[in-house]
Structures are given as structure tokens and as C-alpha cells.
Image (cartoon, rainbow, N blue to C red):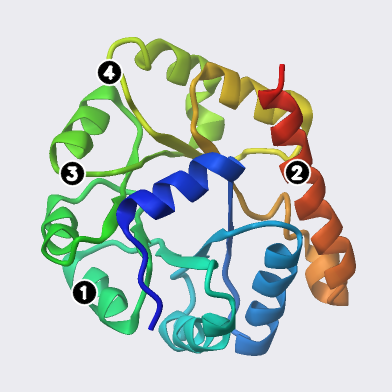
Amino acid sequence: MKKFTQQQIIDAMGQSGLVPLFTHDDATLAQEVIEAAYKGGVRVFEFTNRRPNSFEVFQSALKYFEKYPDLMLGIGTVMDAATTRKFIDAGAHFIISPILKPEMAAVCREHNMLWIPGCATLTEIVTAKELGAGVIKVFPGSVLGPGFVSAITPVVPDLKLMITGGVEPTEANMSAWLQAGAMCVGLGSQLFTKDIIAGRNWAQLEQQVAAALGIIRKIRQR
């Protein structure tokens, strides 16, 4: 079973600036999607726990991707301590939640696991940091906006923020977030469009992922 330190995952997230998120109840399709993203240049991927069989699909993905020693596969939409423990035991490389729940922090601390809680206020963000969150997910991004990020980063230095919810794979949108102070963005349905998934057009998905990573590199070179 692959193991990564928290710092290795944080570094990889910061380096690429992009963490795709996806879920599906078909294990083979999920593997094909993650593989296309990997081939496009992604090294940190969030599979979300939103289907009745997400645990089984995630387990099969972990096994399948043993062949890529540098692919970091985490689980998202985790809401409580018991589920956190279950996915850590299964081999998840990091835990992401749309909420801030201290009981999850305790389990992640116990297993030296990167915990990325979702926060929507400065109080939640500071609390998450105090509880040991290595990265904090700003969610929902589309509601809070880049102005929220640029307002809070001077108040709490050294924040590592991942923006999720409504991020678009365009230069204008990703530039607004990254220049506001975000470390990375999470992209879901904007990247994994219904047409691509329905047609299993993995070559196009690979190109879209590579294009999004290219836009982020371009933004950072300014």
C-alpha cells in the first residue's frame, strides 16, 4: 500500500494548483477517468463519497492505481469520524470534507493523515488551522468569491487554501482565485462534463486536464 507524508501531498497540490474531484458508481469508469486525469498531468485526485457504493469503488481504485507510485488518491465528502476511520483503514491518502467537524480532526491526527475540512468563515478557518488542518477547503467557492480569499489571507498568514465549488477551468476564473491567495483549485463537473463521461472520451478529458494545468502555469509565471 502506498504511503505519502502530509507534506508530500501539500507540496504536490501546491505545485500543480489543481485537484480534480469526481465520483461515479461504475468502478471501471471511475478508474478510466482518474487515469485520463493522471495522463493529463494530475498527481493529486479527490474521489468523492457521494454514492451508495463509493467505498467499494474507491477501494478498487486504490488497488488499480498502485501501478502509479506518484498518484495521490484521497476521499472527499466525508462527514464524520467513523467514515474518516473507515477510509483511512482502506488506504486513502488524504481526507476532504465539505464541513468542519472536530471529531474528524482527532481521527486524522491519530493516523497522521492530511485533513482538509470545508470552511466558509474566518472563524472556521482559524479553528480548522488550530485543529491541525494542513490545507483548508474554501467551500462553496462560487458563493464566497475571490474577494473573500484576498480579505482573509493578510489576517491569517501561511494559509493553504483549496477552492472548491463553482471553479471554472478558464484563465479569468482560476487567475482570480490564485491571485487572491489560493494555493490550488478543485475542479469537478466543469472538467468532467456530462458529454465526456457519457461518450467515454478520455483523450479529450486528458487534453482538458493538461490545458487547465497549462493555464495555471501561465498564471503563475506572470
Comes first in the chain, label 2 or label 3: 3
User: Taking 134 as reference, is 96 above or below it?
Assistant: below
Name the kind of residue labelled 4 in the image: Val
Q: Position of residue 139 (x, y in %)?
A: 43, 39
Answer whether labels 2 and 4 touch (C-beta < 8 Å). no
| Residue under label 3 | 132
User: Taking 38 as reference, is 7 above or below it?
Assistant: above
Q: Residue at x 28, y 74 (%)?
A: 88
Q: Residue at x 64, y 80 (%)?
A: 31
| Residue under label 1 | 85
Of residues 8 and 75, the one nearer the viewer is 8
Q: CA distance from mark 3 to mark 1?
A: 17 Å
User: Taking 54 as reference, is 50 above or below it?
Assistant: above
**For this view, does 149 lie left or right of residue 158?**
right
User: Taking 84 as reference, is 10 above or below it?
Assistant: above
**For this view, does 188 lie left or right of residue 119?**
right
| Residue under label 4 | 156
Q: CA distance from mark 3 to mark 4?
A: 15 Å
Of residues 154 and 21, the one nearer the viewer is 154
Q: Quarter of the image for the N terminus: give it.
A: bottom left
Residue 199 image-quadrant placement? bottom right
Answer whether labels 2 and 3 touch (C-beta < 8 Å). no
Name the kind of residue labelled 3 in the image: Gly
